[in-house]
Amino acid sequence: MIKVLGIGGIFFRAKDPKALGLWYEETFGINKVTDSYDDPAWTQEAGTTVFAPFKQDTTYFGRPEQQWMINFRVADLDATVTALRASRVTVEVADEREPNGRFAQLKDPEGNPIELWQEMPPP
């Protein structure tokens, strides 16, 4: 068996790829892909990455036809939520802390679900 090193990219369809790429860059600091290999790609901080297929009928992602959801690790969930709300992004913070941390949910401008996760050791 071989072991991959990590996720090399996330690819998905968009109604307006240019506008959506710009939203992710302005909202989360994710460099959009350019036509030049000289421009830097987004480099994520090393840490936990969860790879978890869900049952086909899950409601966790929202719309039944939604096939994916991205989860971004954040250092400070409260500060991230405050900044997003200041930018007029609707964010819902989970009331309860899970054993592995705290979570919040939002949607990008095309309705794709995003989860924010502040990883925390168990209490």
Image: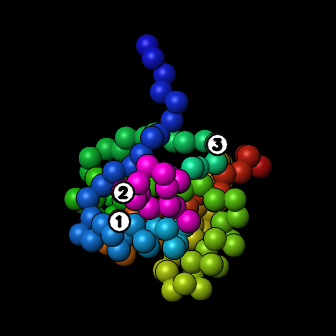
Query: Magenta span covers which residues?
Result: 29-42
Instruction: Tell me residue 99's x, y (percent).
Output: 65, 48
Q: Are marks 1 and 2 in contact (CB under 8 Å)?
A: no
- At a point 43% along the width and 49% down the height, the residue shown is 37
Checking the image for residue 112, the label placed there is 1
Q: How far apart are labels 1 and 2 at the CA level?
A: 25 Å
Q: Which residue, given by chain and number where applicable, does mark 2 sit on?
A: 35
Q: Earlier in the sequence, mark 1 or mark 2?
A: 2
> Disc 3 on helix, strand or loop?
loop
Q: How far apart are labels 2 and 3 at the CA level?
A: 26 Å
Q: Callout 2 environment at 10 Å: few (<14), some (14 to 19), or many (20+)?
A: few
Q: Examine the rendered structure and indicate whether residue 108 appears above or below residue 118.
A: below
Q: Nearer the viewer, mark 2 or mark 3?
A: 2
Indicate the quadrant containing the N terminus: top left, top right, bottom left or bottom right: top left
Instruction: Tell me residue 50's x, y (percent).
Output: 51, 42
Query: Foreground: 17 or 50?
Result: 17
Asked if residue 67 is among those painted magenta in the image, a careful observer would answer: no
Give, as a three-letter code, the residue at label 2: Asp
Q: Earlier in the sequence, mark 2 or mark 3?
A: 2
> Disc 1 on helix, strand or loop?
loop
Q: Callout 1 environment at 10 Å: few (<14), some (14 to 19), or many (20+)?
A: some
Give, as a three-letter code, the residue at label 1: Asn
Apparent side of residue 123 relative to residue 16 in the rendered image (left or right): right
Magenta stretch: helix, strand or loop mostly: loop
Give, as a three-letter code, the residue at label 3: Ala
